[in-house]
Image: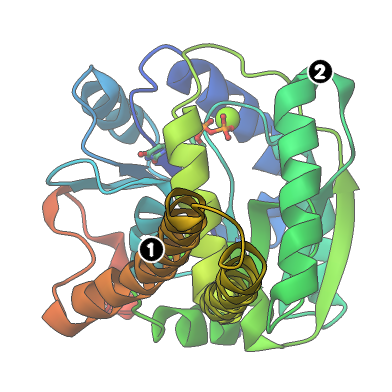
Amino acid sequence: MPPRPRLSIVCPAYQEEDVLPRFHAALAPAVAPLEAEFDLEILYVDDGSRDRTLAVIRALAAADPRVRYVSLSRNFGHQVALTAGLDHATGDAVVSLDSDLQHPPALIPALVAKWREGCDVVLTVRSDDRRLGWFKRASSRAFYRLLAAVSTVEVRPAAADFRLLSRRAADELGRLREPHRYVRGMVQWLGFPAAEVPFEPAPRQGGVSKYTLRRMLRFAADGLLSFSPAPVRLAAAFGLAVTGASWVLSTTAVALLVPLADPAARVGLVLLTALHAIAAGGLVAAGVIGEYLTRIYEQAKDRPLYLVKETSPAPVAAARPARAA
Ligand code: UDP
Ligand code: MG
């Protein structure tokens, strides 16, 4: 008899002590129908939580043999935690979803069905849900429009980090080790046959969102800068435009004002303004270049993306050794 296919469910969790027991309680019945066909592995990634998240995960693993976990040495951020989960998952297909119940586990069989039809990547596309709050919806829509305009790969708007990857897609994604990770863009970059499943995000069922405005901006910057040279080109164009405008301004000012009585002060003022504009343009351009440079610097250091502090005791993963971080 051929071995049963394995299905991994990867759930990153950071400070989720409140919602995790409920998440697991919702996940278990949602994936139960799949157990007729698959060996299941539920892989929690504790992203260096400082609350009782790890203790909760340990208890889940003790009570449920399908549960494995990886605990990272500190908080490395959602995208890296997700990567750690994909690295350690052993399934023939790997589903990732948030552990705050915003991504409905009930949808997992639908993702698996698409994979069965031969898709390597099954994306979930968030419908524009009113419950998300106007700011998150508006900023997300604006961001994806911008990304679509400048990006070198097509990133589906509102494609959440709730998706299924085939074994080969997960392996190939695992070879991309860039430290500033924008996983949904990287998945698109793979280019494997993909399908989409729409879903309505639910409100978070406990705990708080870890994506503060600052984190959201950083995430947006990673998306833009990892997939587009447009910002630096824009900065160069801006610098050129400002410089040109300043030249025109100052020469016409000199030409017009010099014949007038006592124009020195006014000429000086105009020249000063032009100088300021040039300096500002230069600074903006330098800042944008700096953003790319720090990313090159991070990449040049070539550090592992994360360090593992603890894993679940029974290594169910014997069949496929985890890739080095
Ligand atoms: N998360 C993580 N590390 C972090 C921040 C978040 O592993 O540094 C997890 C978090 O526990 C959740 C998922 O990533 O399962 C999405 O985070 P969150 O719900 O806070 O983001 P939002 O849904 O508000 O965009
Ligand atoms: Mg959430």
Image x and y of residue 221, in percent: 50, 57
Label 1 CB, ligand 1: below 8 Å? no
Query: In the visual, does 191 lie left or right of 223?
Result: right
Label 2 CB, ligand 2: below 8 Å? no
Look at 46% across and 27% down and name the residue there: 212
The answer to which image quadrant residue 238 occupies is bottom right
Task: State whether residue 312 appears in this view.
Answer: no
Look at 59% across and 82% down and name the residue there: 169
Question: Quick check: 37 above or below 64?
Answer: below
| Viewport quadrant of the C terminus | bottom left
Image x and y of residue 215, in percent: 43, 39
Task: State whether residue 21 appears in this view.
Answer: yes
User: Across the whole image, how many numbered discs are drawn on residues?
Assistant: 2
Q: What residue type is labelled 1?
A: Ala
Give how far apart the Cα atoms at labels 1 and 2 are: 45 Å
Question: Quick check: 179 above or below 207?
Answer: below
What element does badge 1 sit on?
Answer: helix
What element does badge 2 sit on?
Answer: helix
**Closer to the camera, 264 or 199?**
264
Question: Quick check: 145 above or below 227?
Answer: above
Q: What residue sits right under mark 2 in the picture?
A: 131
Look at 46% across and 50% down and name the residue there: 269
Q: What residue type is labelled 2?
A: Arg
Query: In the visual, does 33 lie left or right of 218?
Result: right
Q: Residue 90 carries which label?
A: none
Q: What residue sits right under mark 1 in the picture?
A: 279
